[in-house]
Image (cartoon, rainbow, N blue to C red):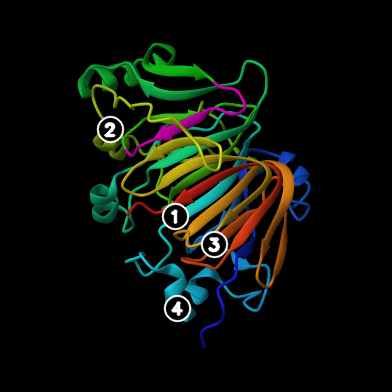
Amino acid sequence: MALDAYPLCFTPVFKERIWGGQRLRQWFPDCPEGVPIGEAWVLSDHPEGPTAIANGPYEGRYLHEVMQLEPAWFQGIQEERFPLLVKVIDAADDLSIQVHPDDAYGYAHAGERGKTECWWVLRAEPGAHIVYGHTAGSRLEFEQRVARGEWSELLRTVPVQAGDFVFVPAGKLHALGRGVMVLEIQQSSDTTYRVYDYDRVDKEGKRRPLHLQDALNVIRYPDLEVKDERRPLERPAGEHLVTCPYFSVDRWDIAGRETFAGQPLSILSVAAGHGTLRHESGFIDLRPGTQVLIPHGMSEWHLDGTLTVIRTILPR
Ligand code: ZN
């Protein structure tokens, strides 16, 4: 049964992580208390944490079911499962130094697609930084520095602040540092190869596994250079952030009212501010952390308020 297209909201799935904290509760009141929560999967069709619809006639159904019931809403998606995963990540402590495979390596070795991701920095404590790339000229040099534990020479660290944008293609060594909270838009994949975990142990005194061989196979030598593609947008005002084979991301700065119609399938992630999304059959309250999926070609809709929205579409 096909229904009139309407914007879909989602119920987040929370993930306990050794490096997590409690700050996601400020945005997501349902976030569990008393355990370190590192990630809220806010829009997901990944089997490790699918999100259910939180509004309208499809409330309680999973994204995957709606894709099957309403193929016209998802026009342009060839895959059976939704290809993107959106998270809000609270790094109360440093994340492990890691890298993700590309599609070819992911399908061959992990049974799923690779992971290219990007971060919009929502919050960063003074002095916060990320690890972004390495200094080794060759795989051999990389391996030697790992063997000698020369992490500070090997890793490139970059200071970050709220409002920064970071593109992390597959093969790029990276890690969020403590005190950083990001919106992450990524290929829907859960494959991470850990290179170094600061020798941390969990409650049971166990170290998390490392995956050095896979990591060495997928890291690029010398380091992968990433071009800054950002350029201003006119309507709505904002900035184009990146286009890659998996997603195209803009920042919209909404002040007042903007009207839209005939847009491609879009994910709206509210990064700051408050407002309302109005459409034919109702309205949605927008506040930091709200995710909305606008079905392909939905009839006229409006954004009202003072908002920073990260808007993601699939590249055509
Ligand atoms: Zn990552």
Q: Residue at x 56, y 82 (%)?
A: 3
Element marked by disc 2: helix
Assign a secondary structure to mark 1.
strand
Q: Nearer the viewer, mark 1 or mark 3?
A: 3
Q: Nearer the viewer, mark 2 or mark 4?
A: 4
Structural crowding at the residue carrying mark 3, measured as other residues with C-alpha within 10 Å and reported as few (<14), some (14–19) or many (≥20): many
Residue that numbered label 1 is attached to: 84
Label 2 Cα neighbours within 10 Å, binned few <14 / some 14-19 / many ≥20: some
Three-letter code, disc 3: Ile
Secondary element type, mark 3: strand
Lateral position of residue 148 relative to residue 164, left or right:
left
Q: Label 2 CB, ligand 1: below 8 Å?
A: no
* N-term-proximal mark, 4 vs 1: 4
Residue at mark 3: C-beta within 8 A of ligand 1: no
The span from disc 3 to disc 2 (Cα, nearest Å) is 39 Å
Q: Residues within 10 Å of mark 4 (few under 14, many from 20)?
A: few
Image-quarter location of ligand 1: top left
Identify the image quadrant of residue 226.
top left
What label does residue 294 carry, if any?
Answer: 3
Separation (CA) of disc 1 from disc 2: 25 Å
| Three-letter residue code for mark 2 | Leu
Q: CA distance from mark 1 to mark 3?
A: 14 Å
What range of the chain is rendered magenta? 160-170
- The picture quadrant where one finds residue 160 is top right
Q: Is residue 41 left or right of 101 when viewed as pictured?
A: right
Q: Nearer the viewer, residue 149 or 154?
A: 154
- Residue for badge 4: 68
Q: Position of residue 154 (x, y in %)?
A: 37, 16
What residue do we see at 52% from left, 88% from top? Answer: 1
